[in-house]
Amino acid sequence: MADRYAELLDDVASKVASMARCLPAISDTDAGDFGRRVADMLAEDWGGSSIYIPKNLASRFRNRDARLYLEYNGNNISELARKYGITQQRVYAIIKAERARRTRRQPPLPGLSDSLF
């Protein structure tokens, strides 16, 4: 069991180091050290705890839906469905929801009439 947790921390350190290497001023050695420090911090702060890490699907779907809406040109429902791996019905639903979300008006301030604008 302890090896499994060490494997998790090694994986975290490796992924963080890999991300850090993308920064121009970070050497491979510094990136590796940084990854290990992040893994050590996680072990120190949450070691021994049973934690749940969400997949952040809602945010991913919001981003996907926004991109899909921007790519929609009125004639490319089938293309968008194939590109995003969803049904044509789902593309229509996303476009409808995004359109509604983007056109939602802020309610008027109390005491101000709509005729002023």
Image (cartoon, helix red, strand yellow):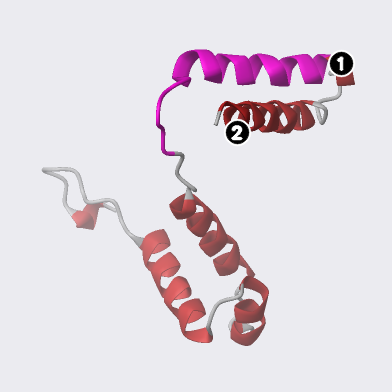
Query: Which mark is drawn over residue 8?
Result: none
Disc tally is 2
Image mark for residue 29: 1
Residue 64 visible at all: yes
Please give the name of the residue rendered at 16% of the width and 46% of the height, measured from the top-left corner.
112
* Dominant secondary-structure state across the stretch colored magenta: helix
Name which residue lies at 69% across and 27% down. 10
Judge the density around disc 2: few (<14), some (14-19), many (≥20) Cα neighbours within 10 Å.
few
Q: Are marks 2 and 1 in contact (CB under 8 Å)?
A: no
Q: Nearer the viewer, mark 2 or mark 1?
A: 2
Residue 42 belongs to the span the image colors magenta? yes
Residue type highlighted by circle 2: Arg
Report the residue marked by disc 2. 4
In reply to whether residue 6 is colored magenta, the answer given is no
Q: Which residues are magenta?
A: 30-52
Task: Mark 2 or mark 1: name the one nearer the start of the chain.
Answer: 2
Q: Is residue 94 found left or right of 23 in the rendered image?
A: left
Where is residue 43 drawn, in percent x and y?
54, 18
Mark 1 burial class by Cα count in 10 Å: few <14, some 14-19, many 20+: few
